[in-house]
Image (spheres, helix red, strand yellow):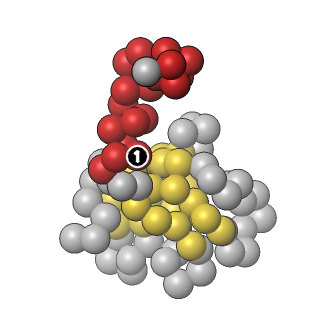
Amino acid sequence: NTYPVGTRIELERMGDDYDPILPGMRGTVLSVDDLGSVQAVWDNGRFLALLPECDKFRKLTSDEVLKENLTKDIGEEQYEQR
């Protein structure tokens, strides 16, 4: 219930992973398994699960999601001029 499919998230810190995703990377929740691992596809194209007990991440606010959607539609440069 906390991370429904489609929720946008941002990584703050990844625990012990041999090939971690960098802080600040954003992604989209695909599912949460029975163990509580948050399966996500990241904006860089990687698929990597988060472990809430090891990794630190947050949900994007509705305003942040709105800004993402606007910048996709009109381009970052045009959005900043508005």
Q: Which residue is mark 1?
A: 64
Point out residue 49 in the picture as x, y percentages from the top left corner: 51, 62
User: Which amino acid type corresponds to the residue marked 1 in the rendered image?
Assistant: Glu
Count of numbered circles in the view = 1
At mark 1, the secondary structure is helix
Relative to 10, is 14 on the left or the right? right
Quarter location, residue 35: bottom left
Q: Nearer the viewer, residue 49 or 4?
A: 4
Q: Quadrant of residue 82?
A: top left
Residue 52 place in picture, x, y as percent: 49, 78
Q: Quadrant of the N terminus?
A: bottom left
Can I make out residue 75 in this image? no
Q: Residue at x 52, y 56 (%)?
A: 10
- The image shows residue 20, relative to residue 68, as above or below, that is below
Q: Looking at the image, which residue is at 44% across and 72% down?
A: 37
Q: Is residue 32 visible?
A: yes
Q: Up-down: is 27 above or below 36? A: above
Residue at 39% across, 51% down: 8
Residue at point 53% right, 48% down?
Answer: 26
Residue farthest to the right, as pictured:
18
Decide if residue 1 is on the left or right side of residue 30: left
Q: Pick whichever, 63 or 15, lies toward us.
A: 63
